[in-house]
């Protein structure tokens, strides 16, 4: 049983820690250090994409384990499901829409640029909500390690 709890803690740490590191440290540093904002965005975008897939895998494994042990109505399951939905919407809905706009070309002040900015804002909000929900999971897993919810 200790292996299961340790594995869960590792998955939560990898996912949520990665989100916080990339989203709140690495991406801002890229934009402050690199003169080319397009390059900074390109690199950050690839890192956010990688983190989305990490989240889908880690979150999926955490959800399966939680349902197996505690049943479907465990409160952390609802947080995990919400996080997975937010990650999926960001990765498979918003990101393709933003990529299409980039391909069309983003001229400052154009309708495409305005739409891109709005989508980027929504994506940022989803990321923030997901990272805060992840913090709730981290705190809950530390508080409840070894016990059922």
Image (tube, rainbow, N blue to C red):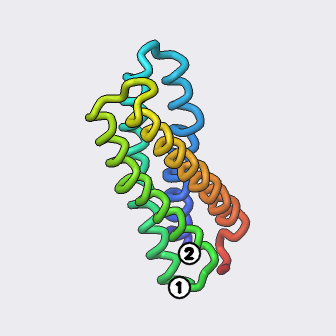
Point out residue 105 in the picture as x, y percentages from the top left corner: 30, 29
Q: Is residue 128 above or below residue 61?
A: above
* Distance Cα–Cα, label 1 vs label 2: 7 Å
Specify the label residue 77 is tagged with. Answer: 2
Name the quadrant containing residue 92.
Answer: bottom left
Specify the label residue 9 is tagged with. Answer: none
Q: In the image as oriented, which residue stretches furthest toward the right?
A: 143
> Tag 1, which secondary structure?
loop
33, 104: nearer the viewer? 104
Labels 1 and 2: the sequence-earlier one: 1
Q: Is residue 86 above or below residue 76?
A: above
113, 56: nearer the viewer? 113
The residue at 52%/31% (across/down) is 26
The residue at 52%/77% (across/down) is 66
Q: Is residue 80 left or right of residue 61?
A: right
Q: Residues within 10 Å of mark 2 (few under 14, many from 20)?
A: many
> Tag 2, which secondary structure?
helix
The residue at 51%/16% (across/down) is 33
30, 36: nearer the viewer? 36
Tell me whether circle 1 and circle 2 mark residues in contact (CB < 8 Å).
yes
Q: How many marks?
A: 2
Q: Is residue 91 left or right of residue 6?
A: left
Point out residue 63 in the picture as x, y percentages from the top left corner: 48, 72
132, 14: nearer the viewer? 132
| Residue of label 1 | 72
Q: In the image as oriented, which residue stretches furthest toward the top?
A: 35
Q: Is residue 49 left or right of residue 75?
A: left
Point out residue 9 in the picture as x, y percentages from the top left corner: 56, 60
Q: Is residue 125 above or below residue 9?
A: above
The residue at 43%/47% (across/down) is 51
């Amino acid at each position: 049983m200790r292996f299961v709890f340790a594995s869960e803690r590792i998955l939560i740490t990898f996912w949520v820690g990665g989100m916080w590191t990339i989203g709140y440290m690495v991406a801002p540093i890229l934009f402050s250090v690199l003169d080319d904002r397009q390059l900074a965005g390109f690199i950050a975008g690839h890192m956010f994409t990688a983190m989305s897939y990490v989240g889908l895998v880690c979150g999926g494994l955490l959800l399966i384990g939680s349902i197996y042990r505690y049943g479907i109505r465990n409160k952390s399951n609802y947080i995990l499901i919400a996080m997975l939905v937010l990650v999926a919407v960001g990765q498979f809905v918003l990101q393709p829409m933003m990529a299409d706009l980039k391909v069309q070309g983003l001229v400052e002040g154009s309708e495409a640029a305005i739409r891109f900015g709005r989508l980027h804002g929504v994506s940022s909000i989803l990321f923030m909500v997901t990272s805060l929900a992840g913090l709730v999971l981290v705190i809950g897993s530390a508080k409840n390690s070894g016990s059922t919810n």
